[in-house]
Image (tube, grey):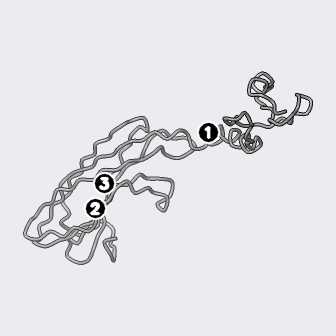
Amino acid sequence: MPVSLELISNSMRGGAFFCGGARDLTEATPTFGALTDNGFAVPVSFPLKMKLVSLLPIVILIGGIAAKTNFKANGTFTCDYNAWCFFVTLWEEDLTESWNDVIDRMGTKCVFGRHSWDYKLDGNEYEDAPFGDKFYEIFLSVRHNCTSHGIREVRSDTTYESVDTAVSYITWDKDLTGDTGTPYKEFV
């Protein structure tokens, strides 16, 4: 005779459900899980649950709970040439350049017959380094050909923004005319 739903719910000990089909509690086999409509227990792997739950504090300590900050950057680039191109990127700076995060970028934009161009970038960043600093290090870079020869890259000064900030506004206006900055072979 199967164990009734009432008998199962009355015999729970330490989160264990007793399987249906047993004649009495001495024959019942403990298993962890949820009861089905007909009173039978559906087993769930308890060791897997414990492993996942035990990893939770480690994940929180290392990665933190990600707070999102929205970055909005805008400004105007100017150039004395009648035809020029640029490629602008909004960055979050990390320990090494190869770890820097791209928050947003505008693809290569070529301008004809104008000496200025307004740009807007908008993107999100979730937390910073796992061990510590509570500030984003934000900068913009622009590669352009508003030079006498080739492509150059210039970057803005780094600004610091708290990871607790919901929205950060950055304005960078730059005259690109001239041969300042780092030479590059390509825009991207």
Residue at x-position 10% and y-position 64%: 115
Image-based side of 49 in relation to 86, left or right: right
| Secondary structure state at the residue bearing disc 3 | loop
Residue farthest along the top direction in this orientation? 10
Which disc, if any, is residue 162?
none
How far across and how far down the image is residue 131, in percent?
58, 43
N-terminal-most mark, 2 or 3: 2
N-terminal-most mark, 1 or 3: 1
Image quarter of the N terminus: top right
* Residue type for callout 3: Ser
Above or below, 4 relative to 108? above
Q: Residues within 10 Å of mark 1 (few under 14, many from 20)?
A: few
Circle 2 is placed at which residue position? 106
The alpha-carbon separation of the residues under discs 2 and 3 comes to 16 Å
Image-based side of 98 in relation to 32, left or right: left
The alpha-carbon separation of the residues under discs 2 and 1 comes to 35 Å
Q: Is the Cβ of the residue at disc 2 closer than 8 Å to that at disc 3?
A: no
The alpha-carbon separation of the residues under discs 1 and 3 comes to 33 Å
Residue at x-position 48% and y-position 53%: 94
| Secondary structure state at the residue bearing disc 2 | strand
Which disc, if any, is residue 156?
3
* Residue type for callout 1: Leu
Q: Quadrant of residue 184?
A: bottom left
Report the number of discs.
Answer: 3
* Residue type for callout 2: Met
N-terminal-most mark, 2 or 1: 1
Q: Nearer the viewer, mark 2 or mark 3?
A: 2
Q: Is the Cβ of the residue at disc 2 closer than 8 Å to that at disc 1?
A: no
| Secondary structure state at the residue bearing disc 1 | helix
